Amino acid sequence: MAKCNIRNRIRELRAENGEMTQQALADAIGVTRQTVVAIEHEKYSPSLEVAFRIADTFDVPLDAVFRYDP
Amino acid sequence: MDWSFQEKSILGSLVITLAAFGYYFLQAFKVFTGASSAAALSLPFVLIGVVAVVIVVEIVYQAVLAIRSRPEGADERDRLIEAKATRIAYFVLATGAVVAAGHALLSVFFTESVEARIVSQPVFTANLIIFSFILAEVVGFALQLYYYRRGV
């Protein structure tokens, strides 16, 4: 698997936001559900724009969603 | 296993390409190893038939898939996966083109045996190029599936 150094709390944030579904998040940020799954499982690092959209959807700062783990 | 619309689409294209062109190159292999110039005449018609079958089966498969699955537009991850796979597939195609060009240029040095005359024919060089193109397609499809499954 490709090494991904970006950790995220998307699963927790979805749970904290009324058990938001992956599809609902995908629709909100303009990607496919499979891409949300890949981001959650840290198989894909999203672009900066999508990362900001995710943070915006949960109404939290970017570093509350993602952190760099070298 | 949860397969996305894109993965099913690519998998279908991979299977169709392998089956159809696998048949074609089996016929081509028989022609070139059989050392029969007459049989080589049928190859272009086999190729045209195979291409026609691929077009029809692809249209039917992709239409059925679109009706049965929920088609999703390509997003940034899909485009990145396609770009990475295409970059490697390009090198496969370029390598094949260089080999075919080298073969064509060096065929002048081949001996005048029957076997040598057959592999020095333009139809053989053309088949080398077609093989490179199909191999690049297969590598591209397979790599896309790999990146979808294993991460990118």
Image (cartoon, grey):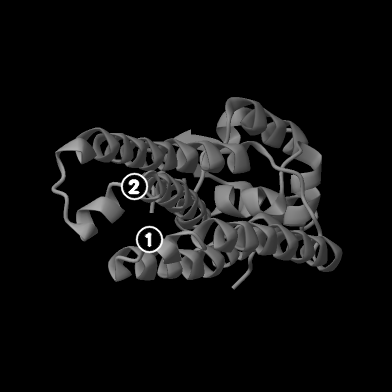
The residue under label 2 is: B121
Label 1 is placed on what type of residue? Ser
Residue B98 lies in what quarter of the image?
top left
Query: Nearest the camera: B112 or B90?
Result: B112
One can see residue A57 in this view: yes
One can see residue B4 in this view: no
Q: SS for tag 1?
A: helix
What is the x, y in percent for residue B112? 16, 50
Q: CA distance from mark 2 to mark 1?
A: 9 Å
Question: Could you tell me which residue is drawn at 25 percent across and 52 percent down?
Answer: B117
Image position of B39 with respect to B108: above or below:
below
Image position of B52 with respect to B130: above or below:
below
In the rendered structure, the answer to whether residue A51 lies left or right of residue B68 reads left
Query: Nearest the camera: A4 or B1?
Result: B1
Question: Could you tell me which residue is drawn at 20 percent across and 36 percent down?
Answer: B108
Q: Residue furthest right?
A: B67
| Mark 2, other Cα within 10 Å: few <14 / some 14–19 / many ≥20 | some
What is the x, y in percent for residue A21? 77, 57
| Mark 1, other Cα within 10 Å: few <14 / some 14–19 / many ≥20 | some
Question: Could you tell me which residue is drawn at 37 percent across and 61 percent down?
Answer: B37
Name the chain under label 1.
B
Check if mark 2's residue and mark 1's residue have beta carbons within 8 Å.
yes
In the rendered structure, the answer to whether residue B152 lies left or right of residue B56 reads left
Label 2 is placed on what type of residue? Gln
Name the chain under label 2.
B
Q: Check the picture and name the quadrant holding the C terminus of chain A.
A: top left
Question: Could you tell me which residue is drawn at 32 percent across and 40 percent down?
Answer: B100
Query: Nearest the camera: B8 or B51?
Result: B51
What is the x, y in percent for residue A42? 49, 49
Q: Check the picture and name the quadrant holding the N terminus of chain A.
A: bottom left
The residue under label 1 is: B37
